[in-house]
């Protein structure tokens, strides 16, 4: 079972069971000290072991992040070294991804 | 209500999400959003998905947690961040075992891609082993497995290097008679 915010990775990774959650990276069970929310999310995630009937099952959990999105951070300060590379060359990277896709049979 | 996502070419895979689906990109920084969105959009659908039936109810199961947060016991060797600082497309492919009794005082987090102060304040935000211990005391789960695991989630450009760690973790879980594995990427 994978508890994952970026559940769309399922398409290219093929996880057996996914519990999807709309929370920021690094705090999939909720914010610091929010013990009831941690518990509710863990129990809901464990429930997916019962609910999932087929390989590739994705269960979208109904929980909402309790803070405004624009006030929520998950990247560290300073940001990861690779992010500077990506920011400088994202258009080229995307072009290569698309080109690779076209070349596939 | 969950399901197996459609393999129809029209299915959007969260871009945008359908009603009732989570938005997978809501919190992502712009460049990371573009990178992941396009990898998913133009990537090949994996249809051969592994599967094991659940053999026991949760309240009889032994549960182990796997994190990608670069966690280690504080007295263990930390994940290598220095090499990544020098070579930003490289990520440490090793793995660590964490004790059943791990807590905020006994854990270390070495990961350049997430703000680790949250989990160091409260491990349950992404590595709910303390909470599982509580659920065991309440007989909600069978037991907390003797060992839990972490890798360092950023693996740079060559995912094949992490494969030996994945195999080793799976073998360790089999040896410990783990029934259910919970993976929590960060």
Image (tube, helix red, strand yellow):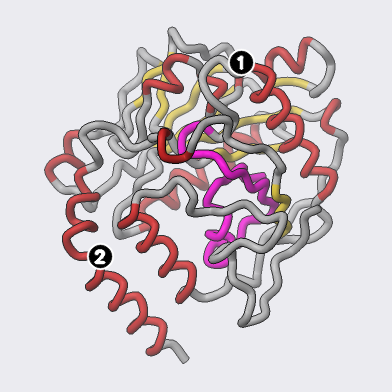
> Residue B21: x percent and y percent?
67, 55
Q: Subunit of mark 1?
A: B
User: Which is nearer the eye, B114 or B158?
Assistant: B114
- Residue A5, position in %: x, y? 55, 46
Q: Residue at x 51, y 19 (%)?
A: A32
Task: Answer left or right for A14 relative to B73.
Answer: right
Residue B54: image location, x then y, percent: 82, 45
| Residue A10 on image: x %, y % | 58, 60
Q: Which mark is residue B36?
A: none
Badge 2 local density, few (<14 within 10 Å), some, or many (20+)?
Answer: some
Judge whether A58 appears above or below B181 on screen.
below
Residue B130's tag is 1
Give the residue drawn at x 80%, y 38%: A47
Mark closer to the observer (1, 2): 2
State if disc 2 and disc 1 touch (CB < 8 Å): no
| Quadrant, the N terminus of chain A | top right
What residue do we see at 18% from left, 56% from top? A85
Q: Chain of mark 2?
A: A
User: Image point 67% across, 76% down: which residue?
Assistant: B7
In the drawing, does residue B102 fall left or right of residue A73? right
Q: Tell me where the magenta segment starts and ends, as one range.
A: A1-27
Residue B178 is inside the magenta segment: no
Position of A96 relative to B99 (above/below): below
Q: Indicate which disc residue A90 carries.
A: 2
| Relative vertical location of residue B4 with respect to residue A80 in this rendering, above or below | below
């Amino acid at each position: 079972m994978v508890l994952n915010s970026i559940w769309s990775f399922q398409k290219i990774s093929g996880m057996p069971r996914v519990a999807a959650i709309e929370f920021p990276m690094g705090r999939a069970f909720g914010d610091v000290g929010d013990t009831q929310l941690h518990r509710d999310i863990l129990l809901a995630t464990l429930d997916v072991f019962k609910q999932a009937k087929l390989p590739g099952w994705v269960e979208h959990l109904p929980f909402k992040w309790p803070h405004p999105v624009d006030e929520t951070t998950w990247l560290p300060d300073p940001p990861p070294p690779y992010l500077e590379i990506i920011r400088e060359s994202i258009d080229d990277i995307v072009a290569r991804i698309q080109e690779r896709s076209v070349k596939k049979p | 209500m969950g399901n197996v996502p459609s393999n129809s070419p029209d299915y959007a895979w969260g871009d945008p999400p359908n009603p009732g689906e989570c938005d997978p990109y809501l919190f992502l920084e712009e460049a990371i959003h573009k990178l992941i969105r396009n990898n998913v959009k133009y990537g090949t659908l994996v249809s051969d998905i592994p599967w094991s039936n659940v053999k026991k109810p949760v309240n009889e199961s032994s549960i182990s947690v796997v994190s990608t947060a670069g966690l280690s016991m504080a007295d263990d060797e930390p994940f290598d961040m220095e090499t990544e600082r020098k070579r930003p497309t490289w990520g440490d492919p090793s793995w660590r075992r964490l004790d059943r009794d791990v807590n905020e005082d006994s854990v270390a987090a070495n990961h350049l891609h997430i703000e680790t102060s949250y989990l160091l304040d409260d491990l349950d935000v992404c590595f709910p082993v303390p909470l599982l211990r509580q659920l065991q005391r309440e007989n909600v789960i069978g037991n907390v497995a003797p060992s839990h695991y972490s890798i360092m989630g950023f693996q740079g450009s060559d995912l094949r290097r992490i494969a030996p760690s994945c195999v080793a973790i799976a073998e360790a879980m089999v040896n410990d008679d783990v029934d259910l594995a919970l993976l929590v990427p960060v």
